[in-house]
Image (cartoon, grey):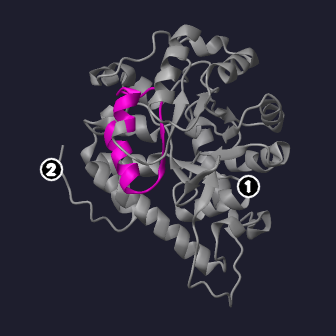
Amino acid sequence: MVPTMSSNFVTLPEIRRAARKRLSRDVWNFGAGGSETETSMRRNRAALNRLAIRQDVLVDVREIDLSTTFLGLPLSMPVAVAPMGGLVLFHPEGDVEMARGAGRGDTLVVLSGATGWPVEDVAAASAGPKIFQLYHHGDRTWVADLLARVEASGYRSVCLTVDVQLYSRRERDIVNRYSPRQAMSVAPNPRGPDPTYPARLTWDDVEWLRKTTRLPVGLKGIMTARDARRAVDSGVEIIWVSNHGGRQLDHTQATIDALPAIVDAVAGRAGIVIDGGFRRGTDVIKAVALGATVVAMGRTILWGLAADGAASVACALDILRSEIRTTLGLCGQTSIRGLQPDSVLRIDD
């Protein structure tokens, strides 16, 4: 591993290059890869690249407002640090260091249910807003105990991940005989007792979850209007449009392509989060224009953690904030909340 670097990075690709230099082949592949042919992962990016941003001119853009709200929570920009398991592989203090960086970057952080640290330790690392992403890796008694700790620690909501019925075939890891889960065992927090439990989850478990926690409940991994409509009819307050960054079902739809129909189905009854291939400020603007409330960024922020810990997480978020502000001004918008579906156009080159 190369010596610790300065966090005076000025572009996001620069941070990514620094991270790659610091990481072993296997850890890089675990973070950068997807399932099987990685078609879903590439499709996420291809779909975003097909969208162009409408450019209006002769607008006074000296003052640009990036702020928004999510579940009544004020946010400085419509971005969250996505939940990512195995952060101990990228930094010795893993989830705790990521929370520190998100706090410094004044950005919502979502803690992965596969955290390597107790939820209390991560909550204490940052005064910023936090959400908990739940992997149902145990029976209901285990989940209820965990949720009580999440509530007591000040997390603002819980999102159940519903697209991990089975662990996918991530061939970058398989071909190199690399076991990420075994490598993560050095982290202090034990993983859930039954990683096979999600295979049995049904809508009955969503109802149980809503009755078990006082926190707003979300579902992460929604990719169809039908499931989104059923979720909000069941009282779910967060619809998280996600294909797990292309790391679960291969050859599925790009999340940005799934978003418009889901927004129509939800009809304002829930907050909408999206992830999947979002890397730059321009990507955030496209998602918000099409109806997302918050864009969850994964790998872009992960590379900051790997490059230089919390300082580079905050640096990546600052660069991202600058990109969003600059793009808004150049397309003639003065507020992120003013974006509309016709702010983007599909271009088939």
How far across and down, in percent of the image, does residue 99 sit?
38, 43
Viewer-closest of 46 and 188: 188
Instruction: Indicate whether residue 127 is drawn in magenta.
Output: no
The crowd level at tag 1 (other Cα within 10 Å; few <14, some 14-19, many 20+) is: many
How far across and down, in percent of the image, does residue 49 sit?
63, 60
Q: Amino acid at mark 1?
A: Gly
Identity of the residue furthest to the left in this view:
3
| Direction from residue 239 to residue 20 in the image, left or right | left
| Direction from residue 267 to residue 205 in the image, left or right | left
First reached walking from the N terminus: tag 2 or tag 1: 2
Q: Decide: is 58 above or below 308.
A: below
How far across and down, in percent of the image, does residue 11 sit?
39, 66
Viewer-closest of 178 and 242: 242
Q: Please identify the quadrant where the N terminus is shown.
A: top left
The segment highlighted magenta reads 96-123
Q: Please identify the quadrant where the C terminus is shown.
A: bottom right
Residue holding disc 1: 291
SS type, badge 1: loop
Instruction: Indicate whether residue 118 is drawn in magenta.
Output: yes
Look at 68% across and 41% down and name the residue there.
241
Q: Nearer the viewer, mark 2 or mark 1?
A: 1
Residue holding disc 2: 3
Give the spatial CA distance, label 2 vs label 1. 42 Å
